[in-house]
Image (tube, rainbow, N blue to C red):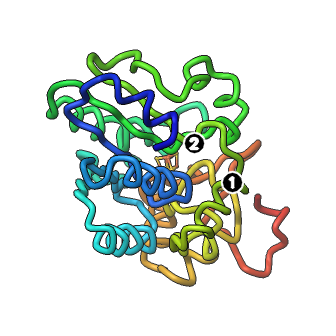
Amino acid sequence: MSGVFREAEWIPFENRVCFWSGGKDSTVVLHLTRKAWGDDIKVVFVDTGITLPETLEYVERMAEEWSLNLTVLKPDLDFWDYVAKNGFPHAKSLWCRRLLKLEPIKRFLYRIHGYRLCILGIRKRESVKRFTAPWYQKPFYRHKRFKFTYNLCPILEWTDSQVDNYLKKNNIPVNPCYKLYGTSGCYYCPYVANKNHYLNLKRLHPELFENIVYAETVARKGKSALYTNRQVFIHKLKPQTALTEYI
Ligand code: SF4
């Protein structure tokens, strides 16, 4: 068992919960956690309601293959109802993370009692913010807001290539979304300002692409789904347009 898991053993946790998004990082962490503690863990996946369909399939397939004790959490409302009410999320108003992910997780954690350990696929190198944030400097720490709750981040210091090498070395299938879209989370995301992502969505899941178009043209008429340094309209996206014209 690696040192970081051993460090978390001095507290008699009643619940060890591994948060799994179906992305590469959390899949590595899930694999490491099962290696350390076997199947004596709960696994939680949050389906935001706008999760890429291939991620849902991947999670379902791997959960069966690995016989996971999986709980799927969902937000209270449909994402597009939230958009009609709040507008599209963007960097300065990232309500989606709170309403689609954090609130369902909070409700779940309140339902389980005793000492809780949350096992997370966070890596410092993912962003400058994470690299410098004081609470991400240690792989095992007490949660600031939740009582009796600790976080464990077994791959906090890992690089991209360490993650890729681990998946390869252990023959772990990778979520196909990385090849298809370059990302594995939500099919619409204010942080995904990549034309090819949306064009692939249009090609593979036209009905989901239409949800974005509908919100731009009817539900939030005149408001674009994306903001970079200007409005970026997904419904105007055309394959022949040069990438720089849009995003
Ligand atoms: S992946 Fe993007 S759209 Fe989904 S919750 Fe996170 S920030 Fe919001």
Query: Callout 2: 10 Å neighbours few (<14), some, many (20+)?
Result: many
**Is residue 235 visible in the rendered structure shown here?**
no
Q: Is 122 or 245 nearer to us in this picture?
A: 122
Mark 1: which secondary structure? helix
Q: Are marks 2 and 1 in contact (CB under 8 Å)?
A: yes
Residue type, label 2: Ile
Residue type, label 1: Gln
Q: CA distance from mark 2 to mark 1?
A: 9 Å
Pick the quarter of the image with the C terminus. Answer: bottom right
x and y percentages locating residue 240 in the rendered image: 79, 81
Residue placed under numbered mark 1 in the picture: 162
Q: Residue furthest front?
A: 1
For the point 36% across and 52% down, the residue is 79
Residue 63 appears in which quarter of the rendering?
Answer: bottom left
14 up-or-down from 44: above or below: above
Q: Is residue 31 left or right of residue 14?
A: right
For the point 72% across and 46% down, the residue is 228
x and y percentages locating residue 167 in the rendered image: 58, 65
**Is residue 192 visible in the rendered structure shown here?**
yes
Q: Is residue 4 left or right of residue 45?
A: right
For the point 50% across and 34% down, the residue is 4
Mark 2 / mark 1, whichever is N-terminal: 2
119 up-or-down from 53: above or below: above
For the point 46% across and 52% down, the residue is 32
Residue placed under numbered mark 2 in the picture: 155
x and y percentages locating residue 22 in the rendered image: 45, 60
Query: Callout 1: 10 Å neighbours few (<14), some, many (20+)?
Result: few
x and y percentages locating residue 28 in the rendered image: 51, 55
Q: Is 22 or 215 nearer to us in this picture?
A: 22
Residue 114 appears in which quarter of the rendering?
Answer: top left
